[in-house]
Amino acid sequence: MSTTTAELLRGAAELFPDEVVTKAHIRHLDLPKGAGRFALITLDNGFDHTKPTTFGPQSLANLDAALDEVEKEAAEGSITGVGLTGKPFIFAVGADLKGLELLKDRGDALAIGKGGHEVFKRLAHLAVPTFAYYNGAAMGGGAEVGLHCTYRTVSSALPAFSFPEVFLGLVPGWGGCTLLPNLIGADRAVSVIVENSLNQNKQLKGPDVFALGIADALFDSQDFLEQSLLWTAAVLTGELEVARPDVDRGETWDQAVERGRAIADSKVHGAAPAAYRALDIIASVKDGDLQQGYDAEDRALADLVMSGELRSGIYAFNLVQKRAKRPAGAPDKSLARPVTKVGVVGAGLMASQLALLFLRRLEVPVVLTDIDQERIDKGVGYVHAEIDKLLAKGRLNQDKANRLKALVTGVLDKAEGFADADFVIEAVFEEMGVKQRVFAEVEAVAPEHAVLATNTSSLSVSEMAAELKHPERVVGFHFFNPVAVLPLLEIVRGERTDDAALATAFAVARKLRKTAVLVKDAPAFVVNRILTRFMGEIQNVIDDGTPVDVAERAVEPLGLPMSPLVLLELVGPAIGLHVSETLHAAFPDRFRVSPNLKAVVEAGKRGFYVYEGGKPELDPEVAALLRQGDTRLTEEQTRTRVLDAVAGEIRLMLDEGVVAEAEDIDLCLITGAGWPFHLGGLTPYLDREGVSERVTGKRFLAPGVASVPA
């Protein structure tokens, strides 16, 4: 360890008092094939796989100390190579985020960046070849440390490999932006670093890592390390030569960077700097000057660690990784009843998606009912077709596919289908009378212990259960579309819902791998209420006279994944109108029903736009329907009006106890509406912009939470 590196890490360690320290254990072994004595370094923080290995300053110092030892052995000629691997199931998952959010000085952030670089670069400069064995999850700095090695192998069962930094508001700052494009080419690197990250932190599997050329060999997980060491021996003895394709440093490099900028523009609209900083670094290392790239990474990392974007990203990360696993207000899980059969009322698209999800995750009998056999057959057919798709993709084997298909059935008679069901969910037409009638029919035939769940998006769960003999077993179970993609599940407690039904609902949500948030029975619950207020104000300013394009551009600085009217198209104008009518009935002073939206729905239009060349243009037929006033707002005035309305609505929701805290609202928006990580949800953004205090007189979150350090 150089004096400079030691000083950097020692100073930084004082800023990370609660670091979970990773050790770097060295063991020596004799390789087969006469390949000589080998030093294997294992990264391990002493916990099981539930606490992944990370790199804080002391952890980096431990790796640095291990490299001191093997560097000496390599120089003496007593070892022929060095390997790096992780504890079972985990290679390493990057920097210690808890520590990063504590940093308050750019110089300290710069020290962390330089310290990581100086340690990792030593792997590339040893006198013997180095090998990274990606045995388990590898993210961020964990993926980067392996890039500094001469060779890499990966387990076929590796579940997650990614560079999530841009997703969080950072750049891969320990060599990722520099080394990855020089290893696999700029276009593939842009996909991994920017595109995957901005697509909700998409993860690569082991075979993907190999196919991209990040790893040189792919081995089965059962004997991964043994096979990796045999492969290593073959490389060291010259029996095996590792060939890599040349990296194209011509126009395709520049085109890849421009493609990345287009992706960033489409996702964050220039509102978040991390993706653009990463692309700048990739552009700067086209000529292969690694040190120039490392220096640029240090500067970008130092700037971004000090940014509000990172604080927001870490806040959002903590919500989905920690708060989501301990839902506020959930009853004791010991009260949950077992669920051995599920009933689904309805066989339309949403009901069929629910049936497929319950079938795959619970692997219990699932029975659908509907008003005629044709609809039932179509619903069961949908589930079978989706299972066949999973089989074709290799996600299921034939035996598993056959077993799942056998578990899903459809019947006309609810008594026949639900007599032994433990959990029955309805997904029928969104009309109170229809849902009340369905629940009365189900209650008459389902066992007394069965939980009756409704997938309503806005109607009162309490009113739905009011006429039942046992309203205490009715619970809201609101999914978001597409069901297989969006993690959120709003679990709604009606006025008479008991703890056993609620606990069962939460237990089922966990098995479905959904993020469950407890919500009070209030109109439109959380996500739809906020989005309706948000999009409703956009619609209001259009109705009042602001041009559609001005209203749409007004909220671009938020960096939302899509504009309000494109989102309305995704949701469906008819559904949007229905929710706005529900909320208007409950809160007529704040929620208007747009006559223009009503006209669009009555005309059978699927949205406001037509698409020419992939770009949205206002549909001329919709333009002819619009009736507007003469109040024309600017983009800034529109944005202020929209954000003020949303801030006021959130304060009312918190005062009403719709959720426990503001954090739950952010968790709902991130997991149910795709709200950007770089904003940290909505309440931190409103706090940072001063909207919260201007409108409500106080912040939503405590000072310093998801904010730029003082």
Image (cartoon, helix red, strand yellow):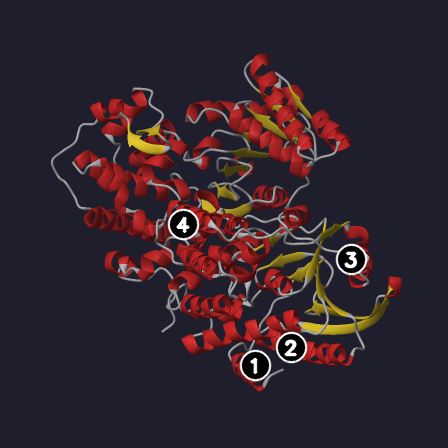
Q: Tell me the kind of residue under disc 4.
A: Arg
* Disc assigned to residue 503: none
Amino acid type assigned to the residue bearing label 1 in the image:
Thr
**In the image shown, does 133 or 388 lie closer to the viewer?**
133
The answer to which quarter of the image holds residue 609 is top left
Marks 4 and 1, the one that precedes in the sequence: 1
What residue did someone put label 4 on?
261
Distance from disc 4 to disc 1, alpha carbons, whole Å, reads 35 Å
Q: Secondary structure at mark 2?
A: helix
Confirm or deny contact between disc 2 and disc 1 (CB under 8 A).
yes
Instruction: Say whether residue 52 is visible.
Output: no
Tell which of 244 and 609 is nearer to you: 244
Give the residue pinned by disc 1: 5
User: Looking at the figure, which quarter contains the C terminus?
Assistant: bottom left
- Does the image show residue 540? yes
Instruction: Judge whether 650 appears above or below 698 on screen.
Output: above
Label 2 sits on residue? 64
The residue sitting at 52% across, 25% down in the picture is: 349
Instruction: Determine contact: label 3, label 4, CB under 8 Å.
Output: no
Question: Which residue appears at 51% of the width and 48% of the height?
Answer: 187
Give x and y (percent) for residue 362.
Answer: 67, 38
Is residue 74 positioned above or below 396 on the image? below
Of labels 2 and 3, earlier in sequence is: 2
